[in-house]
């Protein structure tokens, strides 16, 4: 019976160090690079960058040569170059930024362009070592847009640069400008104006499951009867952390635009992530779906654009504390990997 394995990675800016830390443990347990373990990798925003970067080949003409980027290298990008994407302002910068932020994005495009181009180079969707799906929202057509290697193999016009895919999914409103690109699809206008997919699908696991369910034959999956056997479908969903604090009744009733502008993104992401998690638990066979993420108890470390060492250290330490050093969480992950055929029973 065919087995199909999906990896889903949430959005969350520089909180991407959380899934990177967890994925390093997955590689340790399986003994394989991430791209070899999963048949479809889906991501939104920072998760979209990771889905793309983890599947870029060293040599597009020889995919047996493996991936261009290791998890350690991508972690160094977040730790060492995050401040290029989100430069921390000085005192006067914070004063000016507070006033200017009401009219313009908080950060210029120069930094993210430089970092993403260095990571993605001239790779294209069709070069991906395994199937990927990356989510964004197109303002020109007012539609969700899913960049899929499956689709790009059928339509050469959709075989766009991975840089464009990563940049489109990461164009977080208020943080960065929307990203323009050309991407034909059905009867839609090919001129796209994309913003971060986190506005509608920050946790893309259900989207990935739907993509596979509808198009399973194109993914080379077929059971004996030609239908899907969901006993053989596995989804590992990894988050970037969620701030666990609450907005008080007084704040919710009496605060205005300025208050909500700085908090609504996290509220929306939290709701979408938990709703998707609920739906996946309802849909999936017990043991075939695992969700790993952390609670961020300190509000100052929940900001997705914090590029300082204190923030990354906090997130990595909490990931170790809440996931990797948590016996029940690790047991759940190990049993999942064994059941999916990704690891030997000896790890349990």
Image (cartoon, helix red, strand yellow):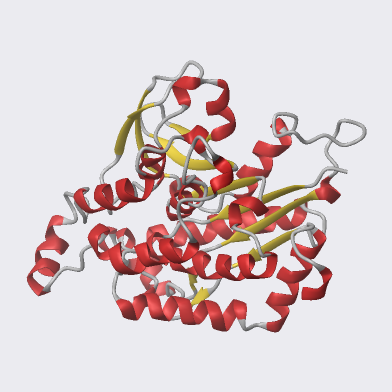
Q: Position of residue 238 (x, y in %)?
A: 58, 61
Residue name at image x 80 percent, y 67 percent: 344
Q: Position of residue 116 (x, y in %)?
A: 33, 49
Seen in the image, is 333 located left or right of residue 321? Answer: right
Question: Which residue is outermost to the top?
Answer: 187
Seen in the image, is 244 located left or right of residue 341? Answer: left
User: Looking at the figure, which quarter contains the N terminus?
Assistant: top right
How many marks overall? Answer: 0
User: Looking at the figure, which quarter contains the C terminus?
Assistant: bottom right
Residue name at image x 41 percent, y 25 percent: 183
Residue name at image x 48 percent, y 60 percent: 70
Q: Nearer the viewer, residue 219 or 134?
A: 219
Q: Nearer the viewer, residue 259 or 185?
A: 185
Q: Position of residue 186 (x, y in %)?
A: 51, 18
- Is any part of residue 315 visible from this angle? yes
Name above or below for residue 69 compared with residue 224.
below
Residue name at image x 12 percent, y 72 percent: 90
Seen in the image, is 330 located left or right of residue 73? Answer: right
- Is any part of residue 145 visible from this angle? no
Name above or below for residue 2 compared with residue 300.
above
Seen in the image, is 100 located left or right of residue 118? Answer: left
Q: Position of residue 267 (x, y in %)?
A: 45, 61
């Amino acid at each position: 019976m065919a087995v199909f394995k999906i990896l889903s990675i949430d959005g969350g800016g520089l909180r991407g160090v959380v899934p990177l830390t967890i994925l390093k443990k997955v590689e340790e347990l399986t003994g394989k690079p991430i791209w070899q373990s999963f048949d479809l990798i889906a991501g939104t925003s920072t998760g979209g960058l990771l889905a793309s970067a983890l599947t870029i080949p060293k040599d597009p003409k020889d995919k047996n040569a493996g991936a261009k980027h290791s998890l350690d290298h991508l972690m160094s990008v977040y730790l060492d170059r995050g401040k290029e994407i989100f430069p921390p302002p000085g005192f006067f910068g914070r004063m000016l930024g507070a006033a200017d932020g009401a009219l313009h994005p908080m950060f210029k495009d120069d930094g993210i362009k430089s970092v993403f181009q260095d990571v993605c180079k001239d790779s294209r969707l069709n070069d991906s070592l395994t199937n990927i799906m990356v989510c964004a929202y197109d303002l020109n057509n007012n539609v969700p847009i899913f960049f899929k290697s499956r689709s790009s193999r059928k339509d050469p016009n959709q075989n766009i640069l991975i840089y464009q895919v990563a940049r489109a999914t990461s164009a977080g409103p208020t943080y960065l400008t929307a990203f323009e690109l050309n991407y034909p699809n059905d009867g839609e206008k090919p001129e796209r104006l994309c913003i971060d997919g986190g506005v509608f699908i920050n946790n893309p696991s259900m989207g990935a499951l739907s993509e596979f369910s509808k198009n399973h034959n194109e993914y080379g999956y077929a059971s004996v009867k030609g239908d899907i056997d969901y006993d053989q479908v596995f989804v590992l969903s990894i988050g970037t952390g969620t701030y666990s604090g609450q907005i008080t009744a007084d704040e919710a009733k009496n605060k205005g635009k300025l208050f909500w502008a700085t908090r609504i993104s996290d509220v929306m992401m939290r709701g979408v992530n938990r709703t998707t998690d609920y739906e996946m638990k309802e849909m999936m066979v017990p043991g075939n779906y695992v969700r790993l993420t952390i609670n961020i108890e300190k509000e100052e470390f929940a900001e997705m654009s914090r590029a300082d060492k204190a923030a990354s250290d906090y997130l990595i330490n909490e990931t170790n504390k809440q996931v990797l050093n948590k016996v029940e969480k690790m047991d759940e992950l190990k049993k999942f990997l064994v059941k999916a055929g990704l690891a030997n029973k000896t790890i349990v």
